[in-house]
Amino acid sequence: MLGLSPWRFVVAFGTVSLLMDFVYEGARSITGPLLAGLGASAAVVGVVTGAGEAAALGLRLVSGPLADRTRRFWGLTIGGYALTAASVPLLGLTGVLWVACALVIAERVGKAVRSPAKDTLLSHATAVTGRGRGFAVHEAMDQVGALIGPLTVAALLAAGGGYGVALGVLAVPGVAALAVLLWLRARVPDPASYETAAAPKRDHTTENPARLPRAFWVYAGFTATTMAGFATFGVLSFHVVERHLLSPALVPVLYAAAMVADALAALATGWLYDRAGPRALVSLPLLAAGVPLLAFTDAVWPVVLGSLLWGAAVGVQESTLRAVVADLVPSPRRATAYGVFAGVLGVATLGGGALTGALYEQSVPMLIVTVAAVQGAALVLLGATWGRRPA
């Protein structure tokens, strides 16, 4: 008998994510100036942070299949979180540029190691709570940490604490997160039992167990398409500052407001997904199409509204998109699917940032029209996913 109800498992895992987002989002908010203070050029900062993000997504193509092959979901989850929890405080202690660069990348490697295994563990409990609602509650709690971390670091720096103190303090939520995670593993050593108890196994005799289902690839195509037409906050914030709509000091406040929209949208679409299935994701292309229409104007309030739409779209991406993967792929291949899905998402996000940035330089109206066309194509692919959701 499992030691926690499915909802308590989801909330406990959400607490772990809240605490760890406190840690690594706090660190990421000052990575640029910290590296610059150690002598890094803008090019070095760009290469290091870019390499970190590439590692966070690309290495999941390895860690996902590894989790499925070894079935060491807890070990990979704990190991990945431990790497992040150790890297951040050490980053505040080092005075050597190359060591700091290695620690920045190591923190992102930790995310790559844990993410497919973590999402698989969470997917088992959400089979009972509802995929959409379970992943949405997890994402909402995650975003609380993403708000607290940068604000805490900013307050400590403003008080004159320096980078060492600001990042050293982040060791506290890191240790707390690992303690909760170890307690959770002791209480629920086999979360797959939630799913097997909730419903009988589906008949997959017509599928090749060595391959991911065709429905997953159709869905991955939808995801890649919608992300290829999604503007990044980097382009949005560039526009805000270059057009003198907000001061640079207010950009983090705008980002924080977008993160609130992120959490609310995750909860709303998660609830809707459990009732309407993948049709709930119609909101994602519509939100993505609305972002450039509002965010790239020359008036403050439309830009603010466009930023909130951007945050809401990110909330859907971070919660409900992950929930659908769990419904499309059977448990034995789910970690692999999450790894592949992250790779698709990473490549598409890179393409979307490059596309929207290049179009912004050429013509904002062209950007708006192109994004609308791309999101229209995404809606067509989403329609193909509707008929492929497992019963």
Image: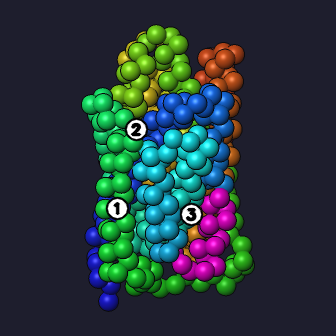
Residue 184 x %, y %: 34, 74
Residue 114 belongs to the span the image colors magenta: no
Label 2 or label 3, whichever comes before in sequence order: 3
Residue 175 is tagged as 1
Tell me the element at label 3. Answer: helix
Q: On the picture, is 119 further left or further right than 384?
A: left
Q: CA distance from mark 3 to mark 1?
A: 18 Å
Residue 64 belongs to the span the image colors magenta: yes
Q: At x 36% / y 48%, what residue is drawn? A: 168
Q: As shown in the figure, which amino acid type bears the numbered disc 3?
A: Val
Q: CA distance from mark 2 to mark 3?
A: 26 Å
Tell me the element at label 1. Answer: helix
Residue 223 x %, y %: 61, 49
- In the rendered structure, are the residues bearing label 1 and label 2 in contact, judged by CB atoms less than 8 Å apart? no
Residue 391 x %, y %: 52, 72
Q: As shown in the figure, which amino acid type bears the numbered disc 2?
A: Tyr
Instruction: Specify start and end residues of the magenta stretch as a single range.
Output: 59-73
Q: Quadrant of the N terminus?
A: bottom left
What secondary structure characterizes most of the magenta part? helix
- In the rendered structure, are the residues bearing label 3 and label 1 in contact, judged by CB atoms less than 8 Å apart? no
Q: At x 27% / y 31%, what residue is drawn? A: 159
Residue wearing tag 2: 163
Residue wearing tag 3: 113
Which of these two is toward me, 109 or 115? Answer: 109
Q: At x 68% / y 22%, what residue is drawn? A: 359
Label 3 or label 1, whichever comes before in sequence order: 3
